[in-house]
Amino acid sequence: MNMFLRELTAGRKALIIWCICMLLLVVSGMGKYTAYSSGGAGSDIFNQMPSSVKALLGIGTLDVTVMSGFYAMLFLYIELTAAIHAVLLGSSIIAKEEKEKTAEFLISKPVSRSAIVTTKLLAALVQIVVLNLVTLISSIVMVSAYNKGKDISGEIILFLISMFVVQLLFLTLGALLAAGISNPKSSGAAAAGILVGSFVISKITDLADQLAVLNVLSPFKYFSYNRIVEGDGLNAVILLLSLLLAAGMAASAYFLYGKRELKL
């Protein structure tokens, strides 16, 4: 429990900063809705955009002149921000002991390495849950303030559930890389590189439907925004497989961290 509280305390300041940034992202993003809503001047601009530009902006076939479509477009950037936080958190929460030269003190305590990893992952899990809840509450409040049509709180909840799964995937990916790569700086760079690569893949497949098979490499494409907007919910099979993948990466992190020779 002491290690758990230690991890939460150590990450408190960074978490507050990330929560403020996410809040500002939601507030500033929703502030643009009136310019693009039905009858707004921005609607003509979107209608005249080439399909390739719409895909790059995350619009695709979404109708951004209604709240559900606009929030789906905004959610792309919300999800990307949350994923960056998760992958950096996952890679740093394990690697930082070697980077800060505190690994010797940590492993000298009467706890196993698996207990250390468990404690750190639980603390990281709490942090991504907090960021997710801040995003959920701020999204519902801001959408309610601007929405003049059908209530989309249910859709927002589904969007944030999908985001939580993506957060889990990148959190465990970051932890896996940190456990397997002895150089803390290299593990963080590798985690960030994979995230950027997966996001680029999601944009490439938006531009070229024939490359849709590559979506399996990008968690950003595991859940369809259009499906949520149209009221079809989340794909239960994809949801389950994503959770199993996250669990598998967490288990691999346990194994690699237990076998690795730490730099004290």
Image (cartoon, helix red, strand yellow):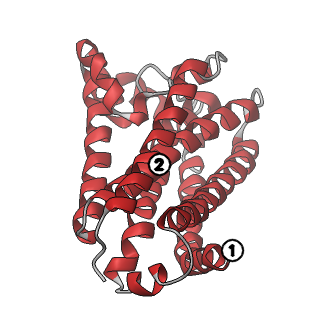
Give whichever of 90, 74 is nearer the camera.
Answer: 90
Q: In which quarter of the image is residue 95?
A: bottom left
Which residue has dot 2 on it? 250
| Residue 37, x across and y down, in percent | 59, 33
Residue appearing at x 53%, y 29% in the figure: 64
Residue found farthest to the top? 210
For the N terminus, the quadrant is bottom right
**Which three-letter amino acid code belongs to the residue tagged 2?**
Ala
Q: In this view, does 125 lie above or below 97?
A: above
**Quadrant position of residue 59:** top left
Viewer can see residue 38? no
Residue type (three-letter) at the residue carrying disc 1 = Met
- Identify the residue under disc 1: 1
How much space separates mark 2 and mark 1, taking CA atoms? 20 Å
User: Residue 261 at what x, y percent from top left?
Assistant: 28, 70
In the picture, measured across the screen, residue 31 lies left or right of residue 134, that is left
Q: Can residue 151 be seen in this view?
A: yes
In which quadrant will I find the C terminus?
bottom left
Instruction: Tell me the SS state at disc 1.
Output: loop
